[in-house]
Image (tube, rainbow, N blue to C red):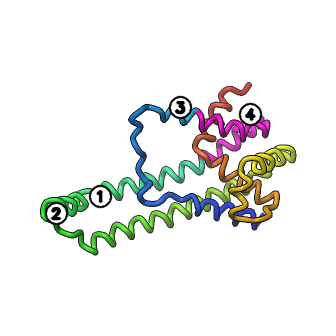
């Protein structure tokens, strides 16, 4: 299980956004809702084979919601820091545009250090979230569901997983499933809707 957890943490490191990816792009053609629906359909194809009960779905949602709360706290912290930086950034930008003044190394270092700190903090949060999920996943899923999750990895993620480990164990495949499926925003939305629809 330890090697599986290490793999899961490595996968999270590989998927961390860069500083330039912190803002979302506009949707000029209004296709984002369609893409969201297609993403949920794709995740449904990976989740429904597990035949989760309503109780299991609720347990997984509870864990995901805890992890999402930690992420939102970090996002709020970063947003507040950026707002505090706005006046100084506007001044540096204005001087660069109107006066041709090169931004000072002091300011650039300040910004770079800020984003470097955030990346470390995000990694720490994702690591804690992964440990939380992996500590509970085998208690929530039964043997047949674990086999189904492994089957999804073999079918959908085999080539991607082999970029990290040549001959993955079942535990590593389960970790890969948990990180790539349950930590996916579209999966959260699908599970939330699926729970509401369950009898």
Q: Position of residue 54 (x, y in %)?
A: 74, 33
Q: Quadrant of residue 38?
A: top right
Tag nearer the camera, 3 or 4: 3
Residue 174 x %, y %: 76, 54
Q: CA distance from mark 3 to mark 1?
A: 36 Å
Q: Which residues are magenta?
A: 38-65
Label 2 element class: helix
Q: Quadrant of the C terminus?
A: top right
Location of residue 154 in the rendering, given as x and y in whole percent from the top left corner: 78, 50
- Residue at the spot of label 4: 54
Q: Nearer the viewer, mark 1 or mark 2?
A: 2
Residue 134 within the magenta-colored segment of the rendering:
no
**Quadrant location of the N terminus?**
bottom right
Circle 3 sits on which residue? 34
Q: Earlier in the sequence, mark 1 or mark 2?
A: 1
Say whether residue 50 is magenta: yes
Q: Mark 2 sits on what residue?
A: 95
- Residue name at image x 13 percent, y 64 percent: 99
Question: Which residue in the protein does label 1 denote?
Answer: 84
Q: Secondary structure at mark 3?
A: helix
């Amino acid at each position: 299980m330890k090697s599986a957890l290490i793999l899961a943490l490595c996968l999270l490191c590989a998927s961390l956004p860069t500083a330039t990816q912190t803002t979302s792009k506009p949707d000029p053609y209004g296709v984002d809702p369609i893409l969201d629906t297609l993403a949920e359909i794709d995740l449904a194809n990976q989740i429904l084979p597990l035949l989760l009960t309503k109780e299991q779905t609720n347990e997984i949602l509870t864990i995901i919601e805890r992890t999402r709360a930690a992420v939102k706290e970090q996002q709020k912290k970063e947003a507040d820091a950026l707002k505090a930086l706005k006046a100084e950034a506007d001044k540096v930008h204005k001087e660069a545009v109107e006066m041709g003044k090169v931004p000072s190394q002091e300011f650039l270092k300040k910004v770079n250090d800020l984003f470097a700190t955030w990346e470390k903090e995000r990694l720490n949060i994702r690591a804690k979230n992964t440990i939380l999920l992996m500590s509970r996943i085998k208690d929530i899923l039964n043997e047949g569901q674990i086999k189904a999750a492994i089957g999804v990895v073999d079918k959908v993620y085999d080539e991607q997983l082999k970029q990290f480990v040549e001959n993955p164990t079942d535990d590593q495949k389960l970790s890969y499933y948990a990180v790539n499926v349950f930590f996916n925003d579209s999966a959260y939305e699908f599970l939330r809707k699926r729970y509401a629809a369950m009898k």
